[in-house]
Amino acid sequence: MSRRLVLGLLLPLAACSPTVHVATPEPLKVDVSMRVDIYQHAASDAPAEGPEAEAQTRRRTRMAEVQTLKNARIVGEDRHGLLAVVQAPPGEYGDYVRRTMEAENADRLALMKQLAAERRVPLAQIETEQSTLWRERAFPGEWVEAQDPDGTWRWVQKQGS
């Protein structure tokens, strides 16, 4: 009896083969935005030395902390290529934010001064270039200082590209 029941159920199912469509009605679209920065480093195999190399090392060490502050929308990129506090938290954490931002800005400024001296251009030009670069590198939602058409500067959250 159970064989007949199983055959009775399987026979109609075997005769019916449903059509499964695996194609999409429209092609899939992928929107990728990428920036590639190419740097030429000294040909020497010896590690870089001096205050600039130390500033770079400190910045690399501090990178995650700075990004965490940016993600929390506490600091943003200003028009001089430096970090600025947008929303200062109170207490000890506020002091930590201020110290971290000041240390990052001191290293950024030292590197900008070195670059200005190497290229023999005014520091203001390097600041403008760096601020543009940092604004471009910012993730959507991060605070950046933007210039209005009338020339005034204000804090805005970067929009998605």
Image: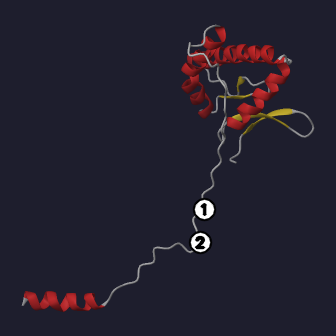
Q: Residues within 10 Å of mark 1 (few under 14, many from 20)?
A: few
Instruction: Identify the residue at the far top of this view.
Output: 50
Q: Nearer the viewer, residue 30 or 153?
A: 30
| Quarter of the rendering containing residue 103 | top right
**Spot occupied by residue 9 in the image (x, y as percentages of width and height):** 20, 88
The answer to whether the residue labelled 1 contacts the one labelled 2, judged by CB atoms less than 8 Å apart, is: yes
Residue drawn at 85 percent across, 18 percent down: 121
Tell me, for residue 26, which label it has, or none. 2
Judging from the image, what secondary structure is the residue with disc 2 in?
A: loop
Instruction: Identify the residue at the far left of this view.
Output: 1
Residue drawn at 68 percent across, 36 percent down: 137
State the count of labels.
Answer: 2
In this picture the colour scheme is secondary structure
Which residue is labeled 1 in the image?
Answer: 29
| Quarter of the rendering containing residue 94 | top right
| Quarter of the rendering containing residue 6 | bottom left
Q: Is 17 displayed left or right of 103 in the figure?
A: left
Q: Nearer the viewer, residue 73 or 48?
A: 48
Q: Amino acid at mark 2?
A: Glu
**Spot occupied by residue 60 in the image (x, y as percentages of width and height):** 57, 21
How far apart are the alpha carbons under marks 1 and 2?
9 Å
Tell me, for residue 89, which label it has, or none. none
**Spot occupied by residue 143 in the image (x, y as percentages of width and height):** 70, 34
Q: Nearer the viewer, residue 98 or 104?
A: 104
Q: Nearer the viewer, residue 90 or 112?
A: 112
Q: Quadrant of the N terminus?
A: bottom left
**Spot occupied by residue 40 in the image (x, y as percentages of width and height):** 67, 26
Say if 106 sits above or below 138 in the image: above
Q: Amino acid at mark 1?
A: Lys
Q: Residues within 10 Å of mark 2 (few under 14, many from 20)?
A: few
Judging from the image, what secondary structure is the residue with disc 1 in?
A: loop
